[in-house]
Image: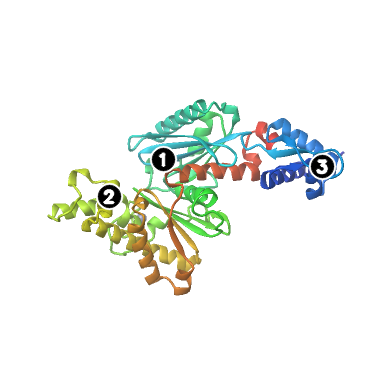
Amino acid sequence: MTHSAIADSSFVREANKALVRDLLRDVGLLARAEIARRTNLSRSTVSSIVSELIDSGFVREVGIGQSSGGRRPVLLEFNYNARYIVGCDIGNNHLLGVLANLEGRVLRREEQAIPLGLSWQQTVEKLGGLIEGLSRQSNVAVEQVLGIGVGIPAPLAYHDGRIANQAILARWQGVRIGEELSKRLGLPCLIDNDANLGALGEHAWGAGRGCANMAYIKLGTGVGGGLILNGALYRGHFGSAGEIGHITIDADGPYCRCGNRGCLEAMVSVQVLLAEAADALRAGRHSLLQPDKLSVEALVDAARAGDALAVEVLDRAGTAIGVAVAGLVNMLNLPLVVISGGLASAGELLLGPIRVAVRQRCLPMLAAGLSIVGAQLVQDAVGLGAVRLVLQEVFSKPELFPARERTLIT
Ligand SMILES: [Zn+2]
C-alpha cells in the first residue's frame, strides 16, 4: 500500500471506531448485529472494533439479549468508568476540584481555601496536590485520569492558553497555567475562563440542559459571563467573549479594576455591595446588618428577614444586572439566562429586580420568551464545566492527548 492509502485506511478505521463508540455511548445497550445494522458496517468490522474497545476498557459485555430467531446476542454498553476526568475551579481565595467519570458523575469533590494573591507557581503546586489527593482518595490511579480541565478567574486567549489581561490577575499575564500544570502532573490539561466553564457545566448538566442558546452570569468578587450559542460555547475571536462584567452601565460610574468606569462589575461585585451596606450603617441607617460581620450570607439572610437596607442593596444590584442582561437579550434573542455565584443565593430577592429591569428595557417580544433562573450546579458549575470541556475535546480532538490514550479513544 502507498503511504496515502495506509493513511486513508487508518483514517477510515478510526472514524468507524468513533462511530461504534459514540453509538454505544448515545444509545445504551446494543448487540454487535444491531450495531452493524445501524452503522452499515460489516459484522466482521464491528466485531474487530468492539474487541479493541473492550480491550481498552471503553466498552464492556453486560449480558444476553432477546433472540430474534438465532443465538441470543451478547449485549454491549459504553463503560463510563473506563477513565476519569478532574475538573478544577481556581477562585480568588479557594481551589475546588471534582473527580468525575465519563458521564460527569462526581465521585469526589475537594475544596481548599487559599490566601489571596498567591503566585501562579504556588497555585500550580497547591492545585497539583489537590488533584493528587482527589485521585488517591477515590482509588483512581493517575493512569486512569484522561485529563484535567481548569477554570481561571481571568480572560484568556483560548488558542494558546495564555492569561490575556493586563489588569486582571496581572502577575499571571502571559503564563500558560495549563502547560505548567500538565508538566507538574504528567497529564493533559485544558484551561478556560471560569464563567465559560460555568456556562458549559450548567448547559450540560444543570439549569441549561437541552437549551441551545443561553447566557450564564457569575456574580462574586468578579462578574463574569459565558455564552452558549447554537448548542456550543461561544468564545469569540480569541476566547474572551461573554465579559458581561465589563459592559458599561454608567459612563460616569465608579472606576473598575479593568481601568474603565461604570462597568457592571464595579457596581455589583460582592465587595462593592458590602461597602454600600457599610457606608449606610456608618451613616446611621438602622438595619439587622452588623458592620463588623458583613458578608454575602449576612446580606442575604437580612434581606430574607425583610431588612430594608439589605433588600435595597440587592434591588439596586438586580437593576444594574438587569440593564446588562437586557442588552445581551436584545442583541442575541436568548431564551435563558442563568444567574450563579455567591450573590445568586439571594434567589428571588435578586432575580425579581433583574426581571423587572429586563422587562423595562428589552423588546417585548424578546422579553416574553425569556427565562431568568438561578443556577442548579451552584459551586460545582465551573468544575463540572471543566470536566465537560475535557470530555468534548478528548473525543473531538484526540491529538491533544498522549499516544497511550489516542489509541484507546480513536
Ligand atoms: Zn471593567
Q: Which mark is residue 67?
A: 3
Query: Mark 2 = which residue?
Result: 301
Distance of label 2 from label 1 (alpha carbons): 36 Å
Amino acid type for the residue under numbered disc 3: Ser
In this view, the residue in front, 6 or 207, is 207
- Badge 2 element: helix
Q: Amino acid at mark 1?
A: Trp
Q: Position of residue 409 (x, y in %)?
A: 68, 38
Of 247 and 22, the residue lying toward us: 22
Task: Give the image quarter of residue 63.
Answer: top right
Ligand 1 positioned in quadrant:
bottom left
In terms of secondary structure, where does tag 3 sit?
Answer: loop
Q: Which residue is mark 1?
A: 172
Task: Assess disc 3: are there few (<14), some (14-19) or many (≥20) residues with their C-alpha within 10 Å of its C-alpha.
Answer: few
Q: Earlier in the sequence, mark 1 or mark 3?
A: 3
In this rendering, the answer to whether 151 lies above or below 362 is above
**Mark 1 vs mark 3: in front:** 3
What's the residue type where badge 2 is placed? Asp
Q: How many marks?
A: 3
Q: Nearer the viewer, mark 2 or mark 3?
A: 3
x and y percent of residue 213 in the render?
53, 60
